Amino acid sequence: MIVKSRKLGNSITVTLPEELNVPENVEFEPSVDSNGNVFLKRIPGFNEEKTQDIHLFMDQFKPLMDKLKDK
């Protein structure tokens, strides 16, 4: 399979075929080596468990934050 870069606004875009199974809305860190090869490193996102842990942590401080917001 061969893909081709193209200009889109002020960026260069390379479309990844669906058959590569790259999910939507996933962040990647791009890099280019000395030969011009482009690499995409996936940035780990939050899973449901991590998101729930964050909400539980924040909920513990909600009463305090509510008191402080009006001061």
Image (tube, grey):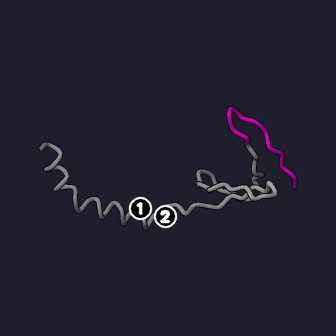
Residue matched to label 1: 51
Residue displayed at 38% across by 63% down: 52
Looking at the rendered structure, the kind of residue marked 2 is: Asn
- Residue 5, horizontal then vertical, whole percent: 80, 44
Q: Residue furthest right?
A: 1
Residue matched to label 2: 47
Badge 1, how many Cα within 10 Å: few under 14, some, many 20+? Answer: few
Task: Look at the numbered discs 2 and 1 and tell me whether their residues touch, using CB distance below 8 Å.
Answer: yes
Quarter of the picture holding the C terminus: top left
* Of residues 35 and 40, the one drawn nearer to the viewer in this rendering: 35
* Left or right: where 24 falls relative to 58: right
Quarter of the picture holding the N terminus: bottom right
Q: CA distance from mark 2 to mark 1?
A: 6 Å
Looking at the rendered structure, the kind of residue marked 1 is: Thr
* Of residues 23 and 7, the one drawn nearer to the viewer in this rendering: 7
Question: Where does the magenta region start and end?
Answer: 1-12
* Left or right: where 58 falls relative to 50: left
- Residue 66, horizontal then vertical, whole percent: 17, 49
Residue displayed at 81% across by 57% down: 35
